[in-house]
Amino acid sequence: MKQLSDSVVAKLRAEMQVPDLDGTRYSVVRQLARGGMGSVWLAEDTVLKRRVALKVLDLVAPADDLAARLLQEARILAGLEHPGIVPVHDAGTLADGRAFYCMKYIEGQTLAQHIARKGLPDKLRLLERIAEPLDFAHARGFIHRDLKPENIMIGAFGEVLVMDWGLAKVGATGLKLAENEIATVVRPTQNSLRVTGQGSVLGTPGYMSPEQARDSTTEVDHRTDIFSLGAILWFMLTGTTPGELPAGTGSMPRPLRAICERAMAADPNARYQFAGEMTADIGRYLSGAPVLAYPEGLLERAGRLYTRHRTAIVLVAAYLLMRVLFIMLERR
Amino acid sequence: MNKVLLGLVLGAILGAIDGMTAWFTPEARAQIAGIVIGSTIKGIIAGLLIGVFARKIQSLALGIVFGLAVGLLLAFIVAQMQHGYYFQIMLPGGMVGLIVGYATQRYGRGPQRQRT
């Protein structure tokens, strides 16, 4: 029997991955990304004549469990209507049996690309906007559990979107989908260990909280996302993930370092309890006010006040100096 | 503190300081009380005008220019009444106006905008 060459096998594999969209309103344009449990495709909605993104499960995956997980992700996204969360338009099963859902196609940059030329205040304001949808989701009982720079997209109009809610956990107030229904090991991707289900670890090293790394499902709550948010801030300020060699952290302002450290505290009780609490501290830093995470010394306080009111201080000092000069001139 | 009150307080304080420096001029020492009161009133008037301006117009540059102009104008009137000392009176007066103009734009609570 004649064996197929590697290139032919690779081509066949690639062809097999292309979702069969017969009988749907979509037609494939190209593949956008590959994940642990499936792939994301750019598609054309032939009815509305617009581009959409389709997340489709791998054909080879044990479909039932993953299909339930994909449906859960779609339902979570559908339940979270927020400008910072990508909206879902449709969900279902393709002719080839693969589960899929359709979402808005975001044309933009990843966080890492976007911040490359941004200054410190812009980066901090961006983090505030990343935290908004997160706070929204937490308030509704959802936990993302896989926050990392790759999952943050900045749209063409500057909109900030938190993507990939595939590992999201539904809390008591969210959808009543039992997490223990799903116990599936998903292929690890290049940088992330994405394993779902009870008795296994999920998340991305570097951005994953200690309790998540321990797979302490009872301990994991919304504060695990606060840890990841702190790690994202660290990445935005240093270009490295926490734990990597801290290149350039010497120049990081101490209050910001303290904010990162508080967000990434090993004990969830020592962290900011809400994303909004963390962004409030960042807002204080931006406005020149003292941050809660950093008890400053007298000299630091004086320095901060001088920086904040520099012009006013210089004007008053100039006025007083002028007055002294006048007095000295009159005495001569 | 709202912008008008901030202008008033700052104008009064700087005006009073302005007046008190007359104590270092021996020939003016006898009238120091009148000078301090007059200078404080001048500061209050300047602060009030600048504060009202800051409440109406939110612009740092315009606030500074308006403050400087008001400070110089009031100081010019005082110098006219004194028949001299234009430089000694108008330079500090202008600076007081400039500082109050800057401060009322930069600090102080602006008017609350009602939603319709």
Image (tube, rainbow, N blue to C red):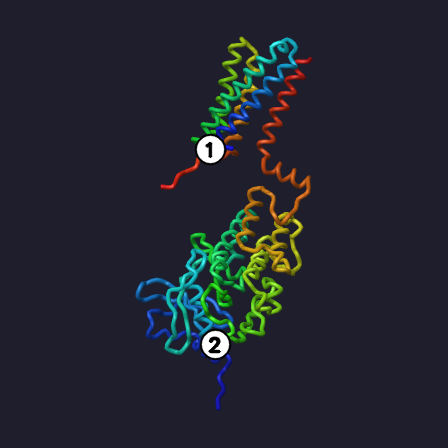
Q: What number of labels is visible?
A: 2
Left-right relation of B87 to A72: right
Residue position for label 2: A65
Please tell me which residue is depicted at 54% across the width and 55% down the height of the picture: A274
Residue position for label 1: B59
Q: Chain of mark 2?
A: A
Please tell me which residue is depicted at 52% across the width and 76% down the height of the picture: A184
Closer-to-camera residue (A304/A262): A262
Closer-to-camera residue (A209/A21): A209
Image coordinates for residue B73, horizontal then vertical, percent: 49, 18
Image coordinates for residue A268, horizontal then vertical, percent: 61, 60
Closer-to-camera residue (B60/A79): A79
Q: Are marks 2 and 1 in contact (CB under 8 Å)?
A: no
Image coordinates for residue A52, horizontal then vertical, percent: 38, 64
Figure quadrant of residue A87: bottom left
Image coordinates for residue B92, horizontal then vertical, percent: 57, 20
Is A52 rendered above or below residue A5?
above
Q: Residues within 10 Å of mark 1 (few under 14, many from 20)?
A: some
Q: Is residue A247 at all visible to an observer of this figure?
A: yes
Q: Quadrant of the C terminus of chain A?
A: top right
Separation (CA) of disc 2 from disc 1: 61 Å
Q: Residue furthest left?
A: A47
- Amino acid on which the number 1 mark rests in the picture: Ser
Please tell me which residue is depicted at 64% across the width and 14% down the height of the picture: B23
- The kind of secondary structure element at disc 2 is helix
Please tell me which residue is depicted at 49% across the width and 86% down the height of the picture: A3
